[in-house]
Image (tube, rainbow, N blue to C red):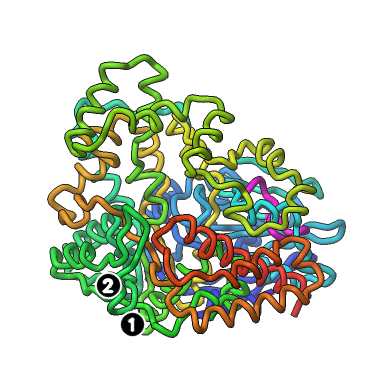
Amino acid sequence: MQILLAPYGQDAQHSWHQGSAGLARTLLRITPEDSLDRQPLWHQGQQLAMVFDGRLDNREELIAQLDIAPSRAAQMADSEIAFHACARWDSEAPGHLLGDYALACWQPRRQRLWLARDALGMRPLFWYWRDDLFAFASMPKALFAVPGLTKALCEESLHDYLCLMPMNGPQSLYRDIFRVEPGQVVELDKGRLGKRYYFRFDPDREIRLGSDDEYEEALKEQLERATCRRLRSRGPIASHLSSGLDSSTVTAVAAGLLGQQDEPLLAYTAAPREGFSGPVPRHRHADETMGAKALAGRFDNIEHVILRRDETATPLDDLHEVIEQLDRAPLNACNMVWEKAIREDAAQRGVKVLLNGNLGNMSISHDGMPYLPWLLAHGKWLTLTKLYRQLKGRNPNLHWRRMIRPCLMPLVPNTIWRARERSQRRIATLFEYSSINPAWSHRMNSEERARRMGFDLSHQPGWQGRKQRITSLYRIDTGEYNAITNLHGMEDRDPTADRELMAFCLAVPESQYLGDGHTKWLIRRTMQGILPSEILDTPTRGLQAPDWHDNAEKLLPQMRQELEKLKAHESAGRYLDLEGMEQAISEWPTEGWDDPWVEARFRLWLLRGMSVGGFIRYAEEGNE
């Protein structure tokens, strides 16, 4: 297990064992205090052993609460402070810890083991249990070192993954392996297994401040605090920088904070190949460098790095390597190409922290659109009319009929929603965006399964924005994606996923997110004068990897070769529509990439099928 995890923690590997229990830790030194790490930790008197993966963002607060002398704390890694917290508060300790982490505590005298992950699941943690053994690890691959455990697929989870349905409960993609869910404690006490959540976001909490300015100031304070927490590093810091609000906000705030300490920031922008001019779907733009350059030019301490796609690269080049690193199929193989390019360049420059704004849509840049049907449902006609006039002021071509869909459709029965959307060719059936074998989907009863999970396959928008976002957060688990960045000697950090920032943004009234003719109104106001107009006022959104289809001469033979392997595989055809995939390859277009349906069929339907097919082969070809 230690050997399999060593690439994720390249700087030190140690283990501890006593009696029937053993712990192993592989360390990647990211913070200055990581040089003090001496895990696994064991205290004979307290009969407590612990392993910890991650970072504490409230070190000073914990040091004070735990009565640790500052001179002593200066010689302690985050793991040791977490150890003292677990010794003081036992399995209630995770509720006191802020940061990105996973941990495990073993109490041999009590014959008790408990595991925990941070509230948003930034670090991964999996477990396996049978009559004579309980094992846990950061990644599933380490658990496959357990004799007798194989990579047997969980068909239900594979089905949900193919149908783009969310994570549901602890089950992983492997039949016998389970995940500790974000914000959860899993406890094995004298042979009895229990699970509980130590943290959940409150859907009823709402913050009421006195003015719009107060909301702006509060968000700015939360943003600076969340970003500052993620700047503790023993090496250079970099950030993703697109032309969107989330990554540009994170980059701007980080650059401002680092500039106060005369420290630099690398900012990475992924761009299409030189000379690429589209086409791209409506309301999108292909090259995000203009907005990114405008922002980078505002900060003297930003070194802006633009990485353009290697014209020879395709989304299938490193697919099997990525699957092995993730222990799962990447949902968007196209994005893995430019993400890897950024990680490789950053690694050459010695970067230790790579900032992103991946969960910004759930926090700082929520669009506020559920406010419209909420006003309609509650009879707030005057406010709704005022908002319409403001929106029309920003967009003179906005006719009142175009307000019917965002205002009324979230409130109508789902059958009416589906019928109207299909008549407008705005909704895809399951088989138009998922390459699942129709016969297998029928056996699994996909529609009914989704309904039992509370998931709408037609993606009808809702009108209870806060509850929707909280539900979506519980269905997201990015742990494995964060872990593969460790393979390049660095750590992904997302200020927009800060627990306190997220809780604040969820509690802000919807009226703060939609106003003055703007969606995402709160972040636009907060960043006014900091972000350039090329980002704040652009009417289109950037499209990641817009030129993914360019190298068809190489990509098509790769897909045909991969398809032949899937057709020869014993069970891939049971799960995937291989005939449909073969037909799609034969119908590969030479134009029309600005048509969303063309993009959906070939970029999403076909490539995701290839990705899942590669994962099926990886899982079913046995252990190393």
Instruction: Look at 77% across and 71% down and name the residue there.
Output: 620
State the separation of the CA atoms marked 1 and 2: 10 Å
The quarter of the displayed image where residue 548 is located: bottom left
Crowding around mark 2 (Cα neighbors within 10 Å: few <14, some 14 to 19, many 20+) is many
Residue assigned mark 1: 349
The quarter of the displayed image where residue 576 is located: bottom right
Is 177 contained in the magenta span? yes
On residue 593, the disc is none
Q: Amino acid at mark 2?
A: Leu
Please provide percent x and percent y for residue 11: 50, 80
In terms of secondary structure, what is the magenta stretch mainly?
Answer: loop
Specify the farthest residue to the right. Answer: 131
Is 470 contained in the magenta span? no
- Is residue 220 found left or right of 434 in the rendered image? left
- Is residue 572 found left or right of 348 in the rendered image? right
Q: Look at the picture and state if 117 lies above or below 147.
A: above
* Segment colored magenta: 167-178
Instruction: Look at 24% across and 56% down and name the residue there.
Output: 253
Instruction: Look at 76% across and 47% down and name the residue there.
Output: 442
Q: Are marks 1 and 2 in contact (CB under 8 Å)?
A: yes
Please provide percent x and percent y for residue 526: 20, 44
Please provide percent x and percent y for residue 596: 44, 55
Residue assigned mark 2: 266
Q: Is residue 246 visible?
A: no
| SS at mark 1 in the image | loop
